[in-house]
Amino acid sequence: MGNASFVIFLSRGDGSNLPIPFIEEMDKKRIGIKYCGGCNPTYERVELVKKVQFLTGERFHFLHFDQKDFEGLLLIQGCERACAMENLNPKEIPHLSITKESELKKIINWLDRFVEKTDG
Amino acid sequence: MKRIVTKEDYIQSLKDLHHVVYYNGKRVEDVTEHPGLRPHIDSAALTYELPLRPEHEDLMTATSHLTGRKINRFTHIHQSVDDLIKKVQMLRLIAHETGSCFQRCVGFDALNAVYMTTYDIDQKYKTDYFERFKKYLIYVQDSNVMVVGGMTDPKGDRSLSPSKQADPDLFTHVAERRSDGIVIRGAKAHMTGGINSHEILIMPTQAMREEEKDYALSCAVPLNAPGVVLIFGRQTNEERKLEGGIDAGNPFGAVGGEALIIFDNVFVPWERVFVCGEYDMAGLLVERFATLHRQNYGGCKGGVSDILIGATALAAEYQGTANASHIKEKLAEMIHLAETIYSGSVACSAMGYKTPSGAYYPDPLLANTTKHNVTRHIYEISRLAHDIAGGIVATMPFQGDLESSEVGRYVKKYLAGAKGIPVEDRIKILRLIENMSGGTALVESMHGAGSPQTQKVMYGRLGNLEQKKRWAKRIVGIE
C-alpha cells in the first residue's frame, strides 16, 4: 500500500481500532466532495463530512468539487431528492451518493474499497 | 464599487456608503453600529456569507449568462425552470439561518422584471433600454451590491390616479428632463432592506395612462445620491432590538427592516434610466415584478415557518406537553400549512416559462395563489404556535428579572418546565416565538408582495372562468 513508513492505530469511533498506515502525501487518494444546495436537509451534512474526515485519518485528500482533480466523488445529499446528482454523468467518475446520516459506515466502507481497488 | 465578497466587505461597504438615514428623528452616521438596524444588516449579510460555503454554493450562486462569471444568485437572471426552482430552494435555506426576512429578494425580482420588460419595450418602441439595463446588470453582478426593489409609492388618496393627486410627489415621477438625464421626485414606501442596501431599482407602482407618462418610470439610483433620504420604519417591539439579549427574541430582527425612501430632486443620468414615459408598458412591469415576488413567499415563509414550528415543538418539550395527542396534531397541521405554501412556490416555478427576452418567468396564477395562501396560513401557523406555547408567550418576565439578584430565583423556580431544561432556554425559545408570530411579522406576510385583494384581481384575470363554465356545460350537455 504505497510507501508506508510506519503504522499507527486510529479509533474508528465504533469500538474498533484499525491499523491506518501512514501514507505519503502523493499516495493519498483525492476525493471530491459535492453537496446539494441544502434547501431543507434532514441532517447536518457538514458535520457528517467532518466525521468522515476524522474517521479516515490522513488517508485521503478531501477536495472541493470545483477543483475537479479527484479520483472519486462523495455526493452529500440533504434528502432523497439527491439534487447534487443533477448534471453529473455517473459513468464518468466513481462516486457514492449519501442521503442519510445513518450511511456513515457506508461511506467509510466505500472509501476503504476505493483504496483497495485503485491500488490494485 | 469594489466587489463585495464577504460579510466583512458588506459591512465595510455600508460604512463607506454615507447615505442619509434617519431613525426616530435622528440622523444615523453609521448604520452598522446602530442596534436598531444591525440585526437586519446581519440577516442580509448571510446572502454574502452563504455563497462562500461549499454546502450551499449550488443554490447560492449561478453563472452569469452575460459574462460567464460565477455570481451571487441574487444578481442572476433566471435562465431555466431549474433556476426558478433553485431560487425558492435558496430562500428556504437562508430562512433556516435567520428565522427572518433577509431582504435581498426584492431587488432580485426587480432586476428580473426590468430585464424582461425593457426587452419588450425596445421591441415595440425601438428604444435602447435593454442594452442600457444589461450594462447596469453587469455592474450589479460584478460588484455584488444589494439592490432595493423600489415599487410601492405612498399613493396618497387611493381613490385618485397619480396625476390627480393634490400633491404630485405622492407617486415617484420625472420632474425634469435634461440632456444628460432626468430629475425625479417622490418617495417609495415599505422599502425592505432600504437602509442596508447600496442601490434602488425604481419601478412604477401601477399601470399608467397617457396623462401619467411621467410616472411610467424605471431607473437605478445609488442610495447615497444627493437628495435621497431614508427613514426607517418602526416595528412592533422596536426597542427590544436596542436592548438586545434574550428579550429581543430573534438576533436577526423581525421581518426585513423597511424604510420610506424619499427622492428630493434626485438627478439620474440616462444610462441608469430604463423606462421613461412608455406608460402602456408600466402595467406589464408591475405585473411581472409582482409575480416574481409572490413566487418567493412559499420559499422564505416556508423556511421561516420551519423555524417557528421547531421553536413551538421545543416549547412543548420544555413544558412537558410534547406527548399530548392534540399537540402532535397541531404540529402536524403547522407542518402541513408550511409545506402547502412551499409547494405553491415550487409549483409556480416548475410551471415557469421563457419570455421573449430569454429570461424565465414563474406561472403567474400559481404565484398569486402561493402568496394568497401565505396571507392566511402564516396567521394560522402563528395561531397554532401561540396555542401550543401557551399564554406565557405574552406574560414572561424581563430578562432583567431572570438575572436579578432579588427575584431571579423566583423566575427560575416558577418558570421551570420539564426536568433538566434550563429556564433560560425555555424563555429564549418562547421569546423567539413571540418575535416571529406577532405584529410586524404577520402584517408583512399579509401585505408583502401585494395585499390579498391584488391576488384576487389576478384570479379574475387568469382564473379562466369562461373556460371552466364551458367545461361544466359540456359535461351535462348544455349547448
Image: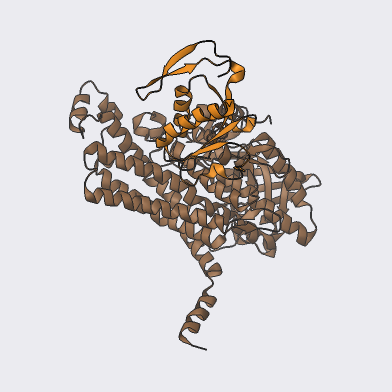
Chain colours: A orange, B brown
Farthest residue toward the top?
Answer: A5
Q: Is residue B401 left or right of residue B262?
A: left
The image position of residue B430, as x and y in percent, is: 30, 38
The quadrant the N terminus of chain B occupies is top right
Q: Residue at x 27, y 24 (%)?
A: B403
Q: Is residue B195 left or right of residue B414?
A: right
The image position of residue A16, as x and y in percent, is: 37, 22
Q: Quadrant of residue B242?
A: top left
Foreground residue among B190 and B254: B254
Q: Residue at x 51, y 46 (%)?
A: B89
The image position of residue B449, as x and y in percent, is: 52, 53
Farthest residue toward the front?
Answer: A120
Q: Residue at x 42, y 36 (%)?
A: A103
Q: Would residue B260 be seen by someone viewing this image from the given angle?
A: no
Q: Quadrant of residue B123?
A: bottom right
Q: Is residue B144 left or right of residue A116?
A: right
Q: Is residue A19 left or right of residue B7?
A: left
Q: Residue at x 48, y 12 (%)?
A: A7
* Label tally: 0
Q: Would residue B476 be seen by someone viewing this image from the given angle?
A: yes
Q: Is residue B451 above or below residue B178?
A: below
Q: Is residue B216 above or below residue B405?
A: below
The image position of residue B344, as x and y in percent, is: 48, 56
Foreground residue among B386 and B193: B386
